[in-house]
Structure formats: structure tokens, C-alpha cells
Amino acid sequence: MSELPQYIESVAKLVDHMIDRYFVNTVGELNKASAYLLTAGGKRLRPAVVLLAADAVRKGSSEDILPAALALEVTHTFTLIHDDIMDDDKLRRGVPTVHTKWDMPTGILAGDVLCARAFEFICQSKANEEAKIRAVLMLARACADICEGQHKDMSFEHRNDVDEYEYMAMVREKTGVLYGAAAGIGGVLGGGSAQQVKALYNFGLNTGVAFQIQDDLIDLLAPPEKSGKDRASDLREGKQTLIMIKAREKGLDLSKYRRDLSNADIEAAIQELTAAGVIDEVKKIAADLVADSNKHLAVLPPSKERQLLMDVGEFFVTRSY
Amino acid sequence: MSELPQYIESVAKLVDHMIDRYFVNTVGELNKASAYLLTAGGKRLRPAVVLLAADAVRKGSSEDILPAALALEVTHTFTLIHDDIMDDDKLRRGVPTVHTKWDMPTGILAGDVLCARAFEFICQSKANEEAKIRAVLMLARACADICEGQHKDMSFEHRNDVDEYEYMAMVREKTGVLYGAAAGIGGVLGGGSAQQVKALYNFGLNTGVAFQIQDDLIDLLAPPEKSGKDRASDLREGKQTLIMIKAREKGLDLSKYRRDLSNADIEAAIQELTAAGVIDEVKKIAADLVADSNKHLAVLPPSKERQLLMDVGEFFVTRSY
């Protein structure tokens, strides 16, 4: 039995503690809006990857780079707040989105504040200065790539001919690079060699793509009381997910589900997709990505942390919410 | 006669060259949207302040920190793109705003990309690593403060009782801190002492506030073919500028101008404000700020660059567009 759930929980406690310290009990509406989604839960997976990556390349104390772990969670939250504005989503983590609870300008600004503060937190880690500069560069590059991925994702909305190759390129940017940066930043701040940092980055990148594919499966398969999200919204909106793309390849027409869907409608869609082998095929793509990404970790010395990183990948594609 | 105009022009050329290199001829709509406002002009004043501040504390080559100078221009542009969305402004530098030319999501993302890339550019300067970390921290802090300032500015829209103290606090954040960061980052990357960096930061902060006050004057006084902006929009929208606050202190009621304004209406408003002494009083506040901020520069050794920094302040409050 993996120690991963326990490990993730312990990281979440550390991160929550830092969020309390830096974001809660601050004055002013904008600070409240910035803190709001950060304190509304979240599994703190990216911080866990930062700390595991650091500890996989050194004997050190995770405390030194806790601020960098926080930086990754803060960056993730910034992108969620802005994405929710662009997609006009009303619900996130079971609570109203920032621009719904406040307004659009406050949502833009709350995201901007978090983006800036993420760079501040990277710099507050205890590591050598050159490593911190490399970490800032990795985070900056990841943020720019995420924007490009989100822009591609939105451009897909006007199309119904997106292929697997385009989808994978988009997901690498939208979700992969932030996990890549999480593992790479942990590696560089932990004093890893260039080869180790690169391996960790690639591990994170592939694992992050698998994470997003699983997320798309969860959108369809998980009950909303578990996911905290509006179920089957991808199906209703005709979103170009890997599920849709594979369905189209197999000649299924899912356009009939582009409307308000009852639970029975959703069950019918799941049955249709399962019968055609779409669900299994999509699950296999995610599982293969994880298997492949674990190969990157072979350059690291065997350790408990390396094993836990591999468990992260496994967890990503087996989680049900 | 000050060499400042010539100096600013030479910096603008260097910055424009870097913008061409990093932002023009890139692929994809989002990159085009990110480059768009950057290439639509702009006086490149913040980059000039970065380079002057660096050269005022050392004998060095400005080329080393050109990327940091670009970072400040990129940060400024990021805030303009997002502000234009929040205020739903249609025109900037004489061209349609990013969210008008593309759409709101592309505007949000274009700003986000620029925000991230600014941190990348700071790191690409040639300076010691510790100085670069301090520069990243200063830029991050400035970005968060700018958001707070913009949020305050928007909250003023629902009020007609903002006082001078509140206005000054807002403008320090919204405009002052980025000039503070420009001068401080130049100072720290140029190898200045802690005392020099602090003095440069305070110089920039006060000068930036003066700049904004002058900007408010220009909104009212400058013909739109010069400013590239929608003239007297502050008056029409009842914006709480220092002009409005001083007018209210003197018992003038400007609410009659909260409507579509002809050129004759604007002239009448200017006459009313001039006769009551509002325009002169506001100009004096800006001029006093510049005089005060130049005192901070006394800790620097006398040099051509120190004089040019003082000229920057003078230019800020005498420019007419």
C-alpha cells in the first residue's frame, strides 16, 4: 500500500498553513478575493510534486523550499480564476467562482495578484540564487505556455474536427507544463543536476497530460457531489476532449448531447461510449503516458521519494474525482 | 537644454528593437495579441528610468540590463491591457484596445502572457544572481500593488466623497510603484547600495505619482489627436481624480458634465476649473512631488544620469501629452 495519500495529506497541511499565514486575515476586498479559491480546498498535488522532486535529488529539508511549493499552488489557482472568467463557469470546488461571487474586474485582478505573488514565493525559498533564477524562468515559461494552451482550448470550441495530435499539444501546454515546472522547480531548488532536472520536468509534463485526460473522464463519470463541478459540462458544450475525439474517430455522433442533460441522458452517453470502447481507449492512453513518464525517473537514485513520484502518476489516472 | 528627449528617444529605439526581436514575427493569434499594444507606440519612459538608475550608481554598460528595461515596459503593457478590459475602454494609443480587436478572453490571456514574460526578462539581464532575485521580488511586489491600486480606483467609481488622502494612496499603488520598481530595479541590477536603491525607489514612487496627476490633467486639457485617448472621459464618467476632488473642496459641482460632452462643453469645464484655481493647485501638487522626489537623489554621486533622472521628473509634470 503506497504512502502517497498520507504524504499528500501532510503536504496539504503544510500548504494550508502557509496559505493561512500569507493570505488569510488580510485586509481589503481584493485580498479576500485572491485568498478565496485558495482556501476553498484543492488537493495541493503540485506542491507535493515540488517537494517530492526536491527530496528525490538530495538529502535536504523540504522546509527550505516550501515557499516554492506554495508558488505552484498559487499559480494553479491564478489560472483557474482567469479560466473561470473566460469560460464563464459559475462553480469551482463546490463554491461560486471568484468573478461570480465578486465581479469580472475583481476576478481578473485576483488572478493577477496571485500570478505576481507566485514569483515572490519562488524567491523566498532557501536555495542558491542561481537555482532560484532558473526556477523563476521555469515558472514564467510555464505561465506563458498555459495561456497559449488555454487559448488553443478556446479556439477548439468553434471546431468539431480537432484531432488527437492537436488535443495533446494543447493539453501539454494547458496542464502538462505546470506539473513539468513543479517537478523541475523542485529538482533545481533541491540542487539536482541538469540531467535530473530535465528528467523531472519530462516526468511532470507527461504525468500532467495524463492528469488532464483523467480530469476529462471525471467530468463525465464522477458524480458532482464528489467532483464539486457541473457534471458532463464538456459533453453538453461539445468540448473537444480526447473522449469526443476518440468517439468521432469511431463514428459516434455526440452532438445530440449538446443540450441540458438529465442524469439519465448522461448515463446513456456513458453507456454508448463504453460500448464503443472509447472509455477504455482513453483510459489506456492516460495509463501509457504514466508508464512512459515513470521511465524518465530512472536517472534518479532509487529512493522513497522517487517511488512516491511514480505513485503520483498512478494516482492521477486511477483517481475517481 | 536637457538631453533628456534625445536620451528617451535612444532608449525607445533599443526597446523597440528588443520588442521586434521577442514579440514580432511570432506565430499564433495569442502572440499577436500580446505584441499588439507593445508595438503600438508608447514613450518607453519606464525603461529609460531603469537604465538611468543603473547608470547613476555605477560605471557599467546599459546593455547588460536592457532585458530588465524591457521587463518594465512589458509589465506596464500587461496592466494597460487588463485595465482596458475592466474599464471597457475602446481606444488606447490611437488604436482599438486588445479585447476590442480580439475578444475579452484573448485580452486576459495576452496580459497574463506579458506578466509572466516580464519576470523572464528580469532574469535574462546580466547582473549578479542575488541582485536579480531582489529585482524579481521588487517587480512581483509592484504588480500586486498595481492590482490593489486599480481595485481601489474602480471602487471610487461608486463614490463621490473620495478625499485627497485616499486618492494619493491609490495613485501610489496604481502608478507610483511601477516607477519606483523601475528605478529600484535599475539601481539593484546596477549594483547600487541598499541606501541608493531605496533612494531610487522613493524617487520613482513620487515621480510616478506626479506622472499620474499630470495624466489626469492631460485627459482634460490635451486634444485627442495628441494623447490618442478619448478626451475628458474622466469628467464624463465622474472619475475621482485630484481635479474632481479639489473642485469639490472648492464647492464646484461637476456632476453636470456627466454626459456626452461637446468640445464647447469641455472648454467650459476647463474655464470653470481654471477660474476656481483648481488647475493651478493640481499642477502645484505635481510639481511639489517632483521637487521632493529629486531630494531623494541627493544620496547618489553627481552624474549626468542623476541629472537626467531629475529631468525625467520635470518632464513628467510639464509634458502636454
Image (cartoon, coloured by chain):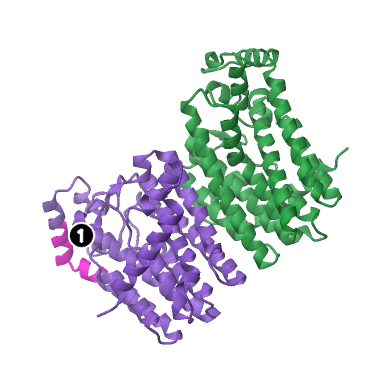
Chain colours: A green, B purple
The quadrant of the rendering that contains the N terminus of chain A is top right
Please tell me in which quadrant of the rendered image residue B193 appears: bottom right
- Camera-side residue: A295 or A191? A295
Instruction: Residue B262 in the image: state x and y as whole percent.
Output: 14, 48
Instruction: Residue B65 in the image: state x and y as whole percent.
Output: 49, 69
Query: In the displayed structure, does residue B193 sit left or right of residue A305?
Result: left
- Camera-side residue: A87 or A277? A277
The chain letter under disc 1 is B
Callout 1, which amino acid? Ala
Query: In the displayed structure, does residue B80 sit left or right of residue A202?
Result: left
Residue at image location 33% in from the left, 59% down from the top? B42
Element type at mark 1? loop
The residue at which mark 1 appears reads as: B222
Query: In the displayed structure, does residue B12 sit left or right of residue A270?
Result: left
Residue at image location 37% in from the left, 71% down from the top? B207
Residue B227 seen: yes
Residue at image location 48% in from the left, 82% down from the top? B59
